[in-house]
Image (cartoon, helix red, strand yellow):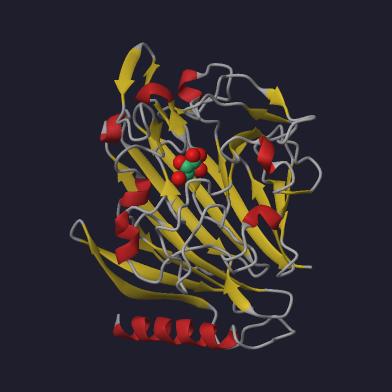
Amino acid sequence: MKFASFMLFAAATTTLAVSCNNNSENKNTAVKPGVTKTDWGKVDGKDVYLYTLVNDKGDTVTITNYGGTVTSFVTPDKNGKYSSVIVGFDSLAPYLQKPPYFGALIGRYGNRIGNAQFSLDGTGYKLAANDGKNTLHGGLKGFDKVVWDASIPNDTVPSLTLKYVSKDLEEGFPGNLNVTVQYTLTNDIGLKIEYSAETDKATPVNLTNHSYFNLSGDVTNTILGETLMIDADNYTPVDTTLIPTGEIKSVKGTPFDFTTPKEIGKDFANVQGGYDHNFVLNKKDNLLDKVAEVSDSISGRVMDVYTTQPGLQFYTGNFLDGKFINRGGTPLAQHSALCLETQHFPDSPNKPNFPSSILKPGEKYHEVTVYKVSVK
Ligand code: GLA
């Protein structure tokens, strides 16, 4: 353990040093490929660790088993300067202050369930209302606030396997749900997240990751200047409590049209409260397809999003208010970061016309999302 901590300290220190250099080859030789583990504290009497995944080029991802949270994703910009495109903290304590899901795994049901209830096979289920009268991101203690069991698989690429068993009626959801999430950092700078689950009773399942990205690597730049493409001809309009009305609406002629790359700020003034909407992805299968692309002219970074899921929540950090301080000391102000949460549609358990999010005993839930960063 001591050795692992030392390795991590060395890795963190050297990454910082490289970030001051201009490295035109975009290869960070100061960190060694592989996975290291360091102690990060305790929650609920369980050990919490920070894992550092380093690929062959020296790009790094740090993940803690508290909430399965991605705390940083360090990649080079067009000048070879390394910085994190994901916001977060360098210690456990601020994560316990309930930040709005920074980098965390979300479950059992990502996004909202209207009126904190649903019925399934004739039985009504009451959930905790933690967002007005609705349930948000799994309830009061969702998968983002539990300690996952972590192991480092013997892989050729750096990976981390996280497991969590969500008990029958935890947060009101039926069935014991066995969840496995595998994070991998590929050599082409892809953060791959693979979700698997099985249940012993029919239950809604909607797993996602809630990373907040700022591709410039500097959260003093708002994300309104970044350019976004989403391969979605339709979105799901919402009521005032952000529950979908049930309508599947064309984006054509609306501020929600990102079918060709558009600056996020362009139509922003016409979206009340900012973007916080589910896009109905054009993909018709559950293959791993490219569904979105963000680019940032300051750093030259581009991020492609691939997923097997049918929906994508585009959220412009509307509720960020400067209360939480990013690593490096900058407050996370409104619109300082964005989320692209791959998912089933919000409130699907109460919307029969949406793709079903129900997992039944004997079935295997399996979804994959990749956030792949490059420079132009
Ligand atoms: C999701 C929701 C937002 C907000 C954030 C967390 O993106 O859609 O409305 O709740 O999570 O603050």
Q: Is residue 51 left or right of residue 367?
A: left
Give me the residue at 50% from left, 26% from top.
240
Nearer to us in this view, 215 or 179: 215
Q: Is residue 62 above or below residue 97?
A: below
What percent of the width, then of the height, locates residue 304? 70, 55
What percent of the width, then of the height, locates residue 74? 57, 72
**Toward which corner of the image does residue 222 lie, by quadrant?**
bottom right
Q: Is residue 180 left or right of residue 293?
A: left
Give me the residue at 30% from left, 58% from top.
96
Q: Is residue 20 above or below residue 207?
A: below
Task: Inspect this view and state whether residue 168 appears.
Answer: no
Task: Inspect this view and state whether residue 230 appears.
Answer: yes
Q: Residue furthest front?
A: 269
Nearer to us in this view, 154 or 295: 295
Give me the residue at 45% from left, 58% from top.
322
Q: Is residue 36 above or below residue 141?
A: below
Assign the C terminus to one quadrant of the image. bottom right
